[in-house]
Amino acid sequence: MKKEGWLVLAVVALVLFAGGLLTWNARAEEKGGMVGKDTCATCHEDVSKAFEATPHAQSALGCEGCHGPGQAHVDAGGDKAKLAKIEALPPAEQSDVCLKCHAKGSQAHWSGSTHDSRKVSCISCHETHPKGPVPKSLLSKPQTELCVTCHPKRRAQIYRSGHMPMREGKMECSSCHNPHGTVSEGMLIQNSINENCYACHDEKRGPFVWEHAPVREDCTTCHDAHGSVNSAMLKVKQPILCQPCHIANRHPSTPHFAKDQYSWNHGCLNCHPMIHGSNHPSGARFLR
């Protein structure tokens, strides 16, 4: 897109954002104005104390930054109908409240993301004023436990023998995925699956003199990143893993017994250890 096109988009975005602020301010005037968080604390002492311990307490609007102006609520003797109850709003409107402040950075692609389109809202995972110690990112549960609530298949996979070090606390789901949405498939942090993998496995990036095509294309051709019952998180054991692509007349390609020289220990890697790529002048067959 040309520079002029980006400029037009930026102006449109600014106008829409300003319009949203004006609408919010208009609603504030209609409801009778702000009363301040100290007024809220007179009736909601426990909630106010919990709120003060969170990053949200830095907001100049305090409680009313999310719940809207409280004057009408106070004048009506605490009538709940006079105040915005976030939990009662539709999921999209719940998130809109948060997006007034959190619409950039890692949350920039929330609108239209996988979670947004499936009616997951910000408060499905986050607590704005949790009781007790303030958790990381205000999550209602530890991250992995929270994610597998909706993704039970992944829970089973991380308990397999070959798994990412998530159970050990060395990784989290957000190590690879951005739950707020990205432009990549599967809400990956990087632009592709391989780029995600290279973030930790940079020795597999290359460049190599002799490249292995499926490795270059997609790491998940051979590996299941969420967990496997096979070593190195392989989708199936060798040599079966290699045989769908390598059925040749000069190499035995029929199923082998467990103690066969082509199956024992590392299977094909007994002879082709540099399977991710080789820089050796004689490494065309990944022998060295």
Image (tube, helix red, strand yellow):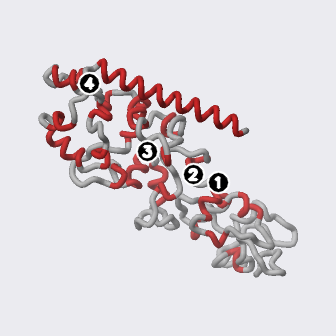
Q: Which mark is residue 33?
A: 4
Instruction: Left or right? Give the position of 21 relative to 247.
Output: left
- State if disc 1 and disc 2 touch (CB < 8 Å): yes
Q: Which one is in front, 246 or 109?
A: 109
Q: Residue at x 34, y 21 (%)?
A: 27
Is residue 61 found left or right of 132 in the rendered image?
right
CA gap between label 2 and label 3 equals: 18 Å
Q: Quadrant of the C terminus?
A: bottom right
Q: Find disc 3 in the rendering and name its residue.
A: 150
Q: Residues within 10 Å of mark 1 (few under 14, many from 20)?
A: some
Quarter of image, res 276: bottom right
Q: 98 or 37: which is nearer to us? A: 37
Mark 1 or mark 3, which has the lower sequence index?
Answer: 3
- Amino acid found under the numbered disc labelled 1: Ser
Find disc 2 in the rendering and name its residue.
Answer: 188
| Mark 1 and mark 3: Cα distance apart in space | 24 Å
Q: What amino acid type is highlighted by mark number 4?
A: Gly
Q: Residue at x 23, y 47 (%)?
A: 52
Q: What residue did someone put label 1 on?
A: 192
